[in-house]
Image (cartoon, rainbow, N blue to C red):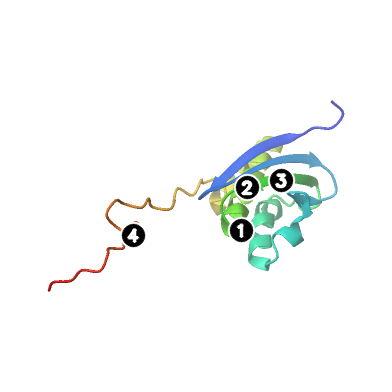
Amino acid sequence: MATQEFIATGRRKEAVARIRMTPGTGKIEVNGKAFEEYFPTTNLQGAVLAPLQIAKSTNAFDVLVNAHGGGPNGQAGAVRLAISRALILTDANLRASLKAEGFLTRDPRMKERKKAGQPGARKRFQFSKR
C-alpha cells in the first residue's frame, strides 16, 4: 500500500459517520459532496473542523466521509468524533488535547422511546375529568 490510511467511526444520536483519512491537502468530502456544501452553516462546519484545528493539521489530511442516519447536527457530531479518533491513530500525543476539548467522548444522549398508551415519550393524551 502506497499511502497510509486511517479509518475511524463516529456516532451521535442516530447518525453514523465512517471516515477514511489520508495524508493530503485538507480536502474534506462528505457523501460525494464538498463538505461546505453538505454542512452549509458555519456552526456545523466549525464542529467538523474543530479537531483538525486543535491538532494544527487542517491542511495535512484528506478526509472521505460516509455519513448516514440522523440529521445534520447529529452527523456533524459523528464526523467530529470520527476525525478525532482518526487523529489519535496518526499521533497518540494529540489524545490529551482532544480529550480536554471533549472530542473523544461519545455523546450518550438518544431519543427516548415512545411509550404504549401515550402519543409520545412523555406526552399524555388529553385528560378529561368529566
Q: CA distance from mark 3 to mark 2?
A: 10 Å
Q: Secondary structure at mark 1?
A: helix
Q: Secondary structure at mark 4?
A: loop
Q: Residue furthest right?
A: 2
Q: Residue furthest bottom?
A: 130
Task: Give the amino acid at mark 1.
Answer: Pro
Above or below, comparing residue 91 to residue 35 in the picture: above
Q: Quadrant of the C terminus?
A: bottom left
Residue labelled with disc 2: 68
- Count neighbours of disc 1 (C-alpha within 10 A) and say few if under 14, some if 14 to 19, many if 20 or more: some
Dot 3 or dot 4: first in sequence order is 3
Q: Secondary structure at mark 2?
A: strand
Residue labelled with disc 1: 72
Identify which residue, 89 or 126, lies in the foreground.
Answer: 126
Picture coordinates of residue 1, whole percent (x, y): 84, 25
Task: Give the amino acid at mark 4.
Answer: Pro
Dot 1 or dot 4: first in sequence order is 1
Q: Nearer the viewer, mark 3 or mark 2?
A: 2
Q: Are marks 1 and 4 in contact (CB under 8 Å)?
A: no
Say which residue appears at 75% left-offset and 56% top-offset.
35
Where is residue 61, by image quadrant? top right
Task: Give the amino acid at mark 3.
Answer: Val
Residue labelled with disc 4: 119
Q: CA distance from mark 3 to mark 4?
A: 36 Å
Residue labelled with disc 3: 65
